[in-house]
Amino acid sequence: MTTIRDIAQAAGVSIGTVSNYLNDPDMVAEETRDRIALVVRELDYHPRAAARSLKSRQTHRIGLVPIISTESDDRSNDPGDNAFLELLAGLNTLATENGFDILISGATNYEQEIKTYDRFVGEAQVDGLILMGIHPQDDRIRILRDKNFPFVAYGRSDLDFPYPFVDVDGASGIIEAVQHLAALGHKRIAYITPPADLMCASQRFEGFVRGMKQAGLGVREEYVISGGFFEGSGYTHTNDLLDLAEPPTAIITANDVSAFGAMRALQERRLKVGRDISIIGFDDISLSEHWQPGLTTITQPVRKLGFYLMQTLFSVMADPSVLPQTVVPTRLVVRQTTGQCKN
């Protein structure tokens, strides 16, 4: 059976480039794209057929272990984060096409998550795993690599060995957000980050620092708060920022849902979002466009990322020596929550 390693060797490119071509041809230069397409035709490569031909697999299930919040206030106040549902839709589309089901088992903490992975692998409940919420030194990746069990990670880490992943370029998205705010005259820019233990937090913070430096602005310690992905986090931390002797004129948040909490904090103080203080989210969930006012946000193709993750996992399951790595760009969508700085 032809694998993407065969395609890469015949086309004279890396496995990652072939993976990018299969996921989204526009991510590959035209000349390279044409060369890969020719090899794909010559070798009669069909990625869906490759996944279906995994004769040795028995369960036809893919495992997914999301972390479920136990904070009651977040459950009651969360206005709806459909980013996970969009990701799941992308995963399920390709899984279903290839006769696979997705087995979801929620965990309330990292330790419980590790135990669930041990059970999935030890009891042969699934044929492959999709890892979410990647940490800088992620034990799950080490464990699965040592067990030679097929997996793909939704994100990069600081580990010193290669592994298959799909990630978004969150740092570039934050840089673009800072540039947008600086162009509007904002100098006091705050950042409510994702949870500090996640790799995406450090990646995006690096983007924030670079963006501020490029804009000729300094990063003020009191303007950077380690937050979370919930409405309550955005609400609480925005109130903390507003209580400072010199509050910021713009706030970048961990995601869109936390941005909604930030907007609620402003509105309770009778401050106009986008006029008195600007707000930027991350994700571009469907509510962002329809929220009042419409949320300026960093968009990522969440459903497409789910498709990429499943396609990458099928490649690994077909050939364990294949380690595709894909980084997907983001872009800023400007709506009504950002405006010219008044101060």
Image (cartoon, rainbow, N blue to C red):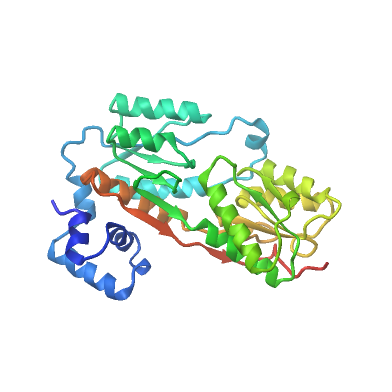
As drawn, 294 above or below 129? below
Q: Residue at x 45, y 41 (%)?
A: 132
25 or 248: nearer the viewer: 248
Instruction: Looking at this view, name the residue that lies furthest to the bottom.
Output: 31
Question: So how many labels did they put on this image?
Answer: 0
Q: Position of residue 122 (x, y in %)?
A: 30, 25
Write the residue at 78% across / 65% down. Answer: 275
Q: Residue 117 location in percent, x, y?
A: 38, 30
Q: Is 95 left or right of 2, judged from the image as shown?
A: right
Q: Can you give x and y, in whole percent of width and height, for residue 211 in the image?
A: 62, 63
Image: 15 above or below 143? below
Task: Name which quarter of the figure residue 103 lies in.
Answer: top left
Q: Does residue 328 appear in this view?
A: yes
Horizontal side of residue 153 vs 4, given as left or right:
right
Residue reaching furthest to the right: 245
Q: Where does the C terminus fall, quadrant-wise?
A: bottom right
Residue 297 seen in render: no
In percent of the image, x 82 and y 57: which residue is there? 271
Instruction: Depth check: give the residue in front, 24 or 28.
Output: 28
Q: Position of residue 240 (x, y in %)?
A: 78, 45
Image-based side of 66 in relation to 209, left or right: left
Q: Residue furthest front?
A: 160
Q: Is residue 312 left or right of residue 243?
A: left
Q: Residue at position x 19%, y 50% from top?
A: 50
Along the viewing direction, whichever of 265 and 165 lies nearer the viewer: 165
